[in-house]
Image (spheres, grey):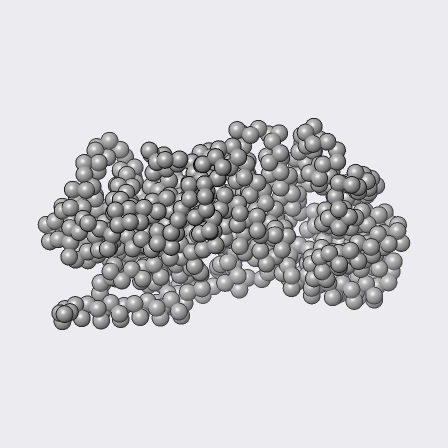
Amino acid sequence: MASDDDRTAAETLRERLILISEIVEEYITDDGLEVRLRALKDRSGDHVSGGPARLIGRRALLDDLLALTRGSRQEPAVLTGPGGAGKTTVAAALAEHVRARGGRVWWVSALDPVALSQGLTTVARQMGAAPHDVEAIARGTVDAADRFWRLLDRVSPGWLLVFDEADDPRALATGTSPAGIQDLTGWVRSSAHGLALVTSRETDPRMWGAARILTIGALDESDAARILRELAPAAGDEDQARALARRLDGHPLSLHLAGSHLRSQATRRATFAAYELAVGRTVESDRLERPAAAAMGALTGRAVELSLDELAQRGVPQARPVLQLVSCYASTAIPEGLLDAGFLSGPPDSRGTTPPIRHLDEALRGLREVGLIHDGSPGGIVVHPVVGAAGRASLDGPEPRPGGIRHTAVALLAADVAGLPPDQPAAWPEYALLGPHLLSLLETTAQQVDRDHLVQLLETAARMAWAFNLSGAGRAGRALCERALAHTAELGNGHLTVLRLRHMLAWAVADQGDLAGAENLYRDVLRNRLRQLGPKHPDVLRCRHELAWIAGCGKEWAKAEKGYRAVLRDSAGVLDTDDPDILITRHELGWAIANQGRLDEARAVLRAVLEDRLRVLGPSHQRTLGTRHELAWILAREGRWAQAETGYRDLLDLRAQLLGADHPETLVIRHELAWIAAHRGRTAEAEAGYRDVLDRRRRVLGEDHPETRATVVALEELRHGRIVDARHSV
C-alpha cells in the first residue's frame, strides 16, 4: 500500500508533467526540441519536485545561462564538456524556461552539414521567411547566413536558438568564415534580441574565441548519489549510493544508465553495491591510463555492457546486435521504417556475413527499459551519441562476424533510399531525414566494411545527392558528395561508383553558378567512363548530355545542338524511346534549336516532347511544365506577346505550387514575365518585375550567379530604353 509520502510525490510528479505538457503544446514548433523535452518528461523516474534528476547539480549553470538570455547585447554562448555530461539536457531545461516566459525557441542539430541545413531551413520557415530566403538558406548561397540573421533580427526579443551537438566546429562555418565562432560571420552570431547557444564536445577555446564559454563536467558526490537514489530508490542507502557515484566519477550519463539498469526488470544486480562490484576495476584503471573524456567514454561503455549482459541473461540476446546496428546511424531520430523487421529476421546472406536479428520489437523494448534508447518524434528511436560510440566500439571486440552488423546497417539504408524516387518532391523530406544517417555511416563505418558494401554505401550517397540537387538543397548535395569522395581511396578515381559521385558533384557545382568548374569535372568523368564503358553506355551518354548543356548555358548553341544530336544518335538501341533521359535530351535539343532562331523547327521538336511527357510523366510533373515553358518562350520570341503571357502566368502558378514561389525555376518565369511586360509597353511594370526578381535572385542564388547577372543587365538596359531578350538554361 502506498504511503502518504509516495502519494504526495506522485501528485507532485503529475503536476510537473502536466505543466511541461502545457508548455510543449503551447510553444513547441520544432521536432528536434520536442523530442528532447518529451524524453525528459517521459522518464517519470527521473523527476522530483525540483526538476529532472539529471539536472541535479546544474542549477548554478542554468542560472548563468538564464542570465545570458536577459543581457542587452547577447554574445553567443558555448556549452562544452565531454559526451554524456548533460549538455543537451541543460540546453533543453533552458529552453523550457525561455518558453515559459513567452520567448521563442528553435532547436537545430549541428551534427553534420545535412542536419544543419535542414534545421536552418526549418527555422527560417518558422520565422515566416519569404520563400526566396528559405531557398537561399537551403542552397547555401554566399550570403545565406546574413539573410538568416536578418530574419532573426526581426523576431520579438527574448528568443533562444540552440545549435546542438556541434562537435565538429566546421559545421558552423559558412563559405568565408572560419570554423567555430571566431569572427561572428558564420552561422552563429551576436544579437541584441536573443541568445545563440551551442553545445559541443570541442573544448579548444580557440574554436570559440568570440563566444562566452561555459564548461560542464562531473557532478559532485552528493548530487551524483542523489540522482542514483531517485532513479533507483530501493537499490541501497546513502553510503552505498555515494560509493557507486564515486566509482562512476559523477558522470551524468553513466549515473543515468546505472539508475535505469537498477530499476529495470532486467537486472539481477538490484543494489548499488552489486553494481559497483560489477563495474569492477576497469574504471579505476581508466582513470589512471586515459584522458578524462576517454575514461568517461569507457565508463559509459562498461555501463552499456552490463545492461546488455543482463538483457541477454533475461532471454533478450538480440538487444546487443540491435544496439550495435542502430549505433551505426546518427544520433538524430532513426525512422521506424529503416529498421525493417522482415529484412533483419531473414537468413544470412550467401557469404554468411549478415547474421539474422530476430524479435526486433522485444529487443527494442528491453533497450528502452534500461535507458539505452529513447523514442523519437515523429516515431523512430534515438541513441545518445556516447551510447552509440560504445555500441560501435563493441563491434571491434571479439564478436562473431562483427562486419555483419555494419553490412546490415549499410544494406538497410541502401534499401530505404533505393525505394525513394529522387526526382519526386514528395520523397524529398524523407531524403532529408535519412541524410544524417548516411553521413554517419560514411564517417564511422565506411572504412570498416568490405568492398561490396562500400560500393553500396557510395552508390546510396550518389542517389541521395541527386535528390538533394534536384530539391534545391545544393549545399547539402555538395557536402554529401565531398564527404563520400573522401572514402574512395580504396576504389580509385576511375571506379564507376566514384565517377557517379563526381558526376553528382559537378551538377551541384554547376547549380551554384560555376560552369567552368563543372565542365572540368564532367570532362574528367567522361574520359574515365569512355575508357571503361565505350561511347554508347548510358553513363557516358548522360555525361555527354551534361557537357552539351554546359555549352548551351555558355550560349554556344551550335555546339550544344551538335552534342545533343550525337547523344540521341548514340542512344538508339541503348535506351528506350520513353526513357526519361531521352526525353530530357530531346527537350534540350529543342531549347538549343530555338535559341538559334529556328523557331518552327524547335516548336515541332518540343510539341512532340510535350506529348510524350504528358503520356509518360503526367501534366503536373516539373519536366512537363519545363516543356510548356519552352513553347511559351517560343511564342514570345515570335512576338505573340498576349498568348505567351497567358501561358507564362499559368506556369507561374503551377511551378510555385510544385517547387515554391522562389525556386530558381520559378524565378525564370518571373524574369520572363517582366520581359514580356516590357515588350507590351508596360515599362513601369517591367521595371518593378525585374527589381523584384533581382532581389529574389540575389537572396536565392547570390550576387555572382549568371542568372542574377542576367537580371542586372536586363534592368539596366530597360532604364536606358532598351529591352534585352530573355534566355534561360534548362
State the quadrant of the N terminus. Answer: bottom left
Residue 690 at x, y = what percent? 72, 59
- The reply to whether residue 139 is in sight is no
Task: Looking at the picture, tell me which residue is in the foreground, 576 or 392.
Answer: 576
The reply, left or right, for residue 367 in relation to residue 675 is left
Q: Nearer the viewer, residue 715 or 679?
A: 679
Q: What's the residue at 35%, 36% (across, down)?
A: 399
In the depicted view, which residue is nearer to us: 157 or 648?
648
In front of the other: 149 or 379: 379
Residue 447 placement, left or right of 271: right
- The residue located at (39%, 52%) in the rendering is 360
Residue 181 in the image: above or below residue 260: above
Relative vertical location of residue 144 with respect to residue 489 in this rendering, above or below: below
Quadrant in which residue 524 is drawn? top right
Asked whether, in this view, residue 393 is left or right of residue 601, the answer is left
Left or right: 93 in relation to 226? right
Q: Position of residue 498 (x, y in %)?
A: 59, 34
The quadrant in which residue 92 appears is: bottom left
Which residue does the image show at 22% across and 51% down from the upper left? 267
Q: So how many labels did they put on this image? A: 0
| Percent coordinates x, y for residue 163 in the rendering | 42, 52
Q: Position of residue 139 (x, y in %)?
A: 58, 50
At a point 43% along the width and 59% down the height, the residue shown is 379
From where the camera sits, is residue 349 visible? yes
